[in-house]
Amino acid sequence: MNTANQNLNQLALAILSKCNNLNHLKQLQSYLTVIGHSQTQFYSFKLVRFCILNLSNFNYARYIFNHLHSPNIYLFTALVTAYASNPDHHLSAFELYRDMVRRAHPKPNHFIFPHVLKSCQNTKVVHSQIAKLGFSQYPVVQTALVDSYSRFMSDIGCARQVFDEMSERNVVSWTAMITGYTRVGEVGNAISIFDKMPERDVPSWNSIIAGCTQNGLFIEAICLFRKMILVAQSKPNQVTTVCALSACGHTGMLQLGKWIEHYGCLVDILGRAGRFEEALEVVREMKIEPDEVVWGSLLNGCKVHGNTDLAESAIKKLIEIDPKNGGYGIMLANLYGGLGKWDEVRKVRKMLKDHNAYKTPGCSWIEVDNEVCQFYSVDKTHPRSEEIYRILENLRLGVA
C-alpha cells in the first residue's frame, strides 16, 4: 500500500472515530464517493460496521451494502452477524445468506455459518450446505449445529449425533448439548453430559441449573447451585442467582415453609462462600419478609468471614423480629465488645433489661422407650431428678 493510501486510511478512520450521528457518517460517505472510493471494500466494511455497532442503524447499513456492486465475504458476514444477533432481524439474516448462495459469490466461509444457523429454522438444509463446502468438522460450526437442531427442530437425536462426531469439544459445545437436552425435557441426559464435562464455566452451571428449574426439578436446581459454590467454588453471576431464586420461588408455591427454608439455604451457601453482595441480593428479591432463618443464615456466613458490619445489621434484624429473645441481644453485645465499642455494649444490655428479654436456654433430647424427653443443663424439673442426679454421680465416680 503506497503512502497516499495509508494517509487516506488514517484520515478516514480518524473522521469515523469522531462521528456520533448519521449525518456525520453520510458526510464521510460523500467524501469517499467524491474521491472515487464509494466501492472500496475496506471503507464500506468500516461504514457498515460503524452503522451497526455505534448507531444501531440496520437500515442505513443495509443501504450502504445494497449499493455495493460486489460485496466481499467480510461484508456479508458482518451484516449476517448483526442481523442474527437481533431477534427482530433473524429473517433478514437468513435471507441475506440465501441471496449470497444464489449469487454464487462470494463463497461462504465457516465463520458465517454459526450466525446463519442462529437465525435459520431449517437446520438440515444449512447442514447439507455446510457438508458440501467441507466445513462439517469445524468445532465452531458443529457447536452451532448442536444448538440449532435442539433450538429450532427439537431434534435432539441429530444434535447428539453431531456432538458425538466432534473430534474437539470445548466447554461451549458441552454446554450447547446440555441446553439441548433440557430444551426437550431430557434433564437426566443433560445431567449425565454435565457430569462428564472435563471442565465447567459459569455458563455451563447456569445451563444445567436453569434447565432443572424450567423442567420443574427445583430441589435439584438448588442442590446444583450449592455444589457450584461450595464444591466447584465457581462465582455465580446474576443469571445464576435468578435461576436459583426462581427455583426457591417455585418450591415456595407448593409449601410456604419450605420456601423460607430454601431461601435460607441459598443465603447460607452464599454467605459461607463469602458472596455477601449476592446473599443480600437474594434477601432483597424475596417475595415475603425475611425471617429468622434467613437472617440467621446470613449471620453464620458473617461469622465465618469476620464481616462485622453485616453481622451487626443481621443481628439487629433478628432483634426486630424477636425482641424478647435475649440471645440475639447478647450476640450483639459480644460483637460490640469484640470491637471495643463499650458504650454500645451498655446500650444493648440496657435494652435487654428494659424489654425483659431472655435467652432461650440450650437443651438436649434423649429417646427412652420410644419416647423423646427434653432436658436442660442443671435441670431439676423432672419428678425423679434427685434419683437421676444420684445415678449420674455414681457413673461419674465409676468412670473416674
Image (cartoon, grey):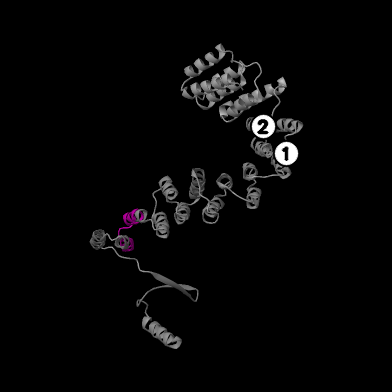
Left or right: 309, with 83 as reference point? left
Question: Which numbered marker is on residue 307?
Answer: none
Which amino acid lies under the numbered mark 2 shown in the image of this protein?
Phe
- The residue that appears at 53% across and 14% down in the rendered structure is 31
Which residues, given as a range, are shown in magenta?
Answer: 312-331
Say which quarter of the image contains residue 345: bottom left
Report x, y in % for residue 255: 48, 52
Say which quarter of the image contains residue 365: bottom left
Which amino acid lies under the numbered mark 1 shown in the image of this protein?
Gln
| Gap between marks 2 and 1 measured at Cα | 13 Å
Report x, y in % for residue 158: 72, 40
Q: Is residue 127 above or below residue 323?
A: above
Question: Which numbered marker is on residue 137?
Answer: 1
Q: Magenta stretch containing residue 319, yes or no?
A: yes
Which sits earlier in the primary sequence, circle 2 or circle 1? Answer: 2
Is the residue marked by circle 2 packed among few (<14), some (14-19), or many (20+) residues within 10 Å? Answer: many
Question: Which numbered marker is on residue 113?
Answer: 2
Residue 213 visible (yes or no): no
